[in-house]
Structures are given as C-alpha cells and as structure tokens.
Amino acid sequence: MTPQPAVGEAPAIGRMSIEKQFHGDLEAASFGQMLTAVSSVKGSAGYVAIEQVAGSLHGQSGAFVLQHSGTMTRGAPQQVVSVVPDSGTGQLAGLAGAMTIGIADGKHSYDFEYSLAGAR
C-alpha cells in the first residue's frame, strides 16, 4: 500500500493505492484505491476500497473486482470484502463470493469463498 496525497482539508481522511500479489489457488495481481478515516478514539477507524484482481483462480483465467468495507470499533474489527456482481471477465465471468482477510504476525492471508456460474 502506498499513501496518496490527503483528501481536501480533512486530516482524519487518508487515501492509499493498493498493489497486491496473491499466491495459492488464486494466482493473481491486484490494483486499487482505498479511502480511510481515523477517529479521535484510539482503535476506531473505517475504510472502503475497490481493487481489480487479474490472474487465475483454480486454473480459470480472467479478472474481477473486489469491494471492501471495514470498521474498527475500539480495536474490534468488522469487515466485508465481496466480489462486485457481474465484474468477472474471461473464464471468471459469473464469479460471486466474499473474501475474509486474516492478519497474523503482520502477514495477511485470505480465505475466498466463491461460486462460479457455469463452472466445469
């Protein structure tokens, strides 16, 4: 993630560019944008993001878009990361699903529950 210039005059609002590599059943690269807001209460914040993922999922190639929405209330996280409906291209057309992001020892891992309409 790369910080971007601040949005307007609001110091609590930030923006980041996203570049990721996925390895495993999903072999892909992603690019996107994230907006964040941090409150004056320690551990409370929110973010939204859109990222386009391109590569292969179990050998099926194409691209799709993920939409993120997350909040943290005094350190307790809530997050939804879902495939934007009808955003799948190529062999990933018809992809639907959601992703769970886990963070342990500063490393991110992803669990992707999905369905692929017309999958063979």
Image (tube, grey):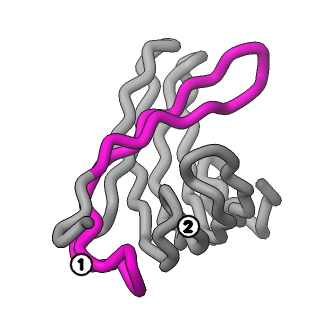
Image height of 86 relative to 83, above or below: below
Mark 2 and mark 1 lie on one chain; the one further toward the N terminus is 2
**Residue 24: where, in percent of width, then height?**
63, 44
**Residue 51: where, in percent of width, then height?**
53, 67
**Residue 106: where, in percent of width, then height?**
77, 22
Image height of 11 relative to 107, above or below: below
Q: Residue visible at 39% across and 84% down?
A: 89
Q: Which residue is mark 2?
A: 56
Q: For this rendering, which residue is in front, 117 or 41?
A: 117
Q: Residues within 10 Å of mark 2 (few under 14, many from 20)?
A: many
Name the outermost residue toward the right: 2
- Residue range in magenta is 85-114
- In the image, taking residue 83 as reference, residue 42 lies left or right, namely right
- In the image, taking residue 29 as reference, residue 4 lies left or right, namely right
Q: Residue visible at 50% across and 24% down?
A: 44
Quadrant for the N terminus in the image: bottom right
Q: Which residue is mark 1?
A: 86
Q: Residue visible at 52% across and 64% down?
A: 59
Name the amino acid type tagged 2. Ser
Q: Secondary structure at mark 1?
A: loop
Name the outermost residue toward the bottom: 90
